[in-house]
């Protein structure tokens, strides 16, 4: 872990206006889709985050040309070789998108098992099962997987779980397969719709995105496009959660309030009003948080990527909260860090019970201290907690936060928070 940390002095309410950029989870698969055509794919409104940097390096190493011009990234040309470097697989889960994109264009792909945040096992069986059904041969090698396919044939694929990455991989592969692919029980996240819209603008024939059955008619080739992915609902949700907790009045541009229905249900109360439309959100809060009952699950239910933020905010509520994590098996690393600060949380299996420190008879006091983020969203969540605590906290693990939040310190400083990026000497 690096010696960088965020020094946060909490206690201020938040107010002002921020803008969210393209969603990490839409931009990454869309960049990967750029190698499905030899023509230019221009992806607009890309965030400056390290996962996007890693994806551009990966595409270049595979033989595509990638040009960053401010917030636009141009993917030019197709991959020329099919082996994904181990280094990328280890630190970026999105290297998994190379499975579908390389198989569809080069007929082969070799990769070690992709990594990502340390939040769970994250197997690839659903991806591989789908690819096999489309005619690919999958072999396990010493260090990973090799998939080959002379030709890909459309197939009916029943997914045992609506995996976001597997849905995206299979969509990409199916766009260039022969005939019709039907994906049943596929993921319905807004990022899936954004990828489908981008692929359609490249000439793909896709219908049913946003529902659990998608149909994709394979085409001979795809074309270049200029495309703007959806705004980042998780960054917007993180800012909304921070505002609900710290109090204030914050406007968030570029976020679609309809993508955050389940999160808003948890945050909204007589003390917190949230409204907006498909390009804008406004959060007004007194800073008083109430106990919640929530359970993460595939979209449109509560997103696992907001569970750490909701849990950390619940530590400051005036009640008892129960939060269940059903998507990833190891996503409570932030609990130990909050306990270090004095929060009272009991975890039993996949369920955390949080005794809010603002409860009238609460004996618990949450004080500033040093905490370590061990994954991206836990990092965002610990920053929110630190913004609430009157006093100084240090949040380490900034390299995880930078994977998905563009200069998080600037976002919160512009709203009146005190967040300084610094390092130990
Ligand atoms: C994507 C998001 C991530 C988010 C997650 C769930 C990107 C780049 N990342 O990750 O931010 O937290 O969706 O909303 O978009 N699974 C299997 N077998 C598989 C694939 C998945 O068992 O072949 C399991 C996983 O271990 C996990 C669950 O399914 O428990 C959900 O995973 P999935 O939807 O695939 O998440 P990702 O696409 O990796």
Image (cartoon, grey):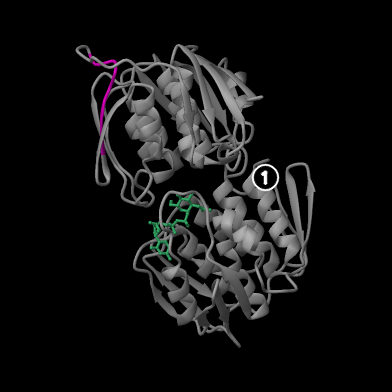
Pinpoint residue 382: horizontal percent, then vertical percent. Answer: 46, 29
61 left or right of 325 in image: right
Q: Is residue 224 above or below residue 176?
A: above
Question: Is 112 contained in the magenta span?
Answer: no
Q: Is residue 210 visible?
A: yes
Please report the residue visible at 36 percent of the width from the left and 33 percent of the height from the top.
336
**Where ligand 1 lies, by image quadrant?**
bottom left
Please report the residue visible at 49 percent of the width from the left and 66 percent of the height from the top.
207
Single out the residue that lies furthest toward the bottom: 150
SS category of the residue bearing label 1: loop
Pinpoint residue 341: horizontal percent, then vertical percent. Answer: 38, 22
Among the 4 quarters of the image, the one containing residue 148: bottom right
Among the 4 quarters of the image, the one containing residue 343: top left
Please report the residue visible at 69 percent of the width from the left and 62 percent of the height from the top.
34
Single out the residue that lies furthest toward the left: 361
Q: Which residues are magenta?
A: 352-359
Pinpoint residue 85: horizontal percent, then vertical percent. Answer: 66, 65
How many discs mark residues in the rendered view?
A: 1
Which is more toward the observer, 186 or 387?
Answer: 387
Which is more toward the observer, 277 or 69?
Answer: 69
Pinpoint residue 204: horizontal percent, then vertical percent. Answer: 61, 69
Please report the residue visible at 40 percent of the width from the left and 35 percent of the height from the top.
334
What residue would you read off at disc 1? Answer: 46
- Within 10 angstroms of label 1, few (less than 14), some, or many (20 or more) residues? many
């Amino acid at each position: 872990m690096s010696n960088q940390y965020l020094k946060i002095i909490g206690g201020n309410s938040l107010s002002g206006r921020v803008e969210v950029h393209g969603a990490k989870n839409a931009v990454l698969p869309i960049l990967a889709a750029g190698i499905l055509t030899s023509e230019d794919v221009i992806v607009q409104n890309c965030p400056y985050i390290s996962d996007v940097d890693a994806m551009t390096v990966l595409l270049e190493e595979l033989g595509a040309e990638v040009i960053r011009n401010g917030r636009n990234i141009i993917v030019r040309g197709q991959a020329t070789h099919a082996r994904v470097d181990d280094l990328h697989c280890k630190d970026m889960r999105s290297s998994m998108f190379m499975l579908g994109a390389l198989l569809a264009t080069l007929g082969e792909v070799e990769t070690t098992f992709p990594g990502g945040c340390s939040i769970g096992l994250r197997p690839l069986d659903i991806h591989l099962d789908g690819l096999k059904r489309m005619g690919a041969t999958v072999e396990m090698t010493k260090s990973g997987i090799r998939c080959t396919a002379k030709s890909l044939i459309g197939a009916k694929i029943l997914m045992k779980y609506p995996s976001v990455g597997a849905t995206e991989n299979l969509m990409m592969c199916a766009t260039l397969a022969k005939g019709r692919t039907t994906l049943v029980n596929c993921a319905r996240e807004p990022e899936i719709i954004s990828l489908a819209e981008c692929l359609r603008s490249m000439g793909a024939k896709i219908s049913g995105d946003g529902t659990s059955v998608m149909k994709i008619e394979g085409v001979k080739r795809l074309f270049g496009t200029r495309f703007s992915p959806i705004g980042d609902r998780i960054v917007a949700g993180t800012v909304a959660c921070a505002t609900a907790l710290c109090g204030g009045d914050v406007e968030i541009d570029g976020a679609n309030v309809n993508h955050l229905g389940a999160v808003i249900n948890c945050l909204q109360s007589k003390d917190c009003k949230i409204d907006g439309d498909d390009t804008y959100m406004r959060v007004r809060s007194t800073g008083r948080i109430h106990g919640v009952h929530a359970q993460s699950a595939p979209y449109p239910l509560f997103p696992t990527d907001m569970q750490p933020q909701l849990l950390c905010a619940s530590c400051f509520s005036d009640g008892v909260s129960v939060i269940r994590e059903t998507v990833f098996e190891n996503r409570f690393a932030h609990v130990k860090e909050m306990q270090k600060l004095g929060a009272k949380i009991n975890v039993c299996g996949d369920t955390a019970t949080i005794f809010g420190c603002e409860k009238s008879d609460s004996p618990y006091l949450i004080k500033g201290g040093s905490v370590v983020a061990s994954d991206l969203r836990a990092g965002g969540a610990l920053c929110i907690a630190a913004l609430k605590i009157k006093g100084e906290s240090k949040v380490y693990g900034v390299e995880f936060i930078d994977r998905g939040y563009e200069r998080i310190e600037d976002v919160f400083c512009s709203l009146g928070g005190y967040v300084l990026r610094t390092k130990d000497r």
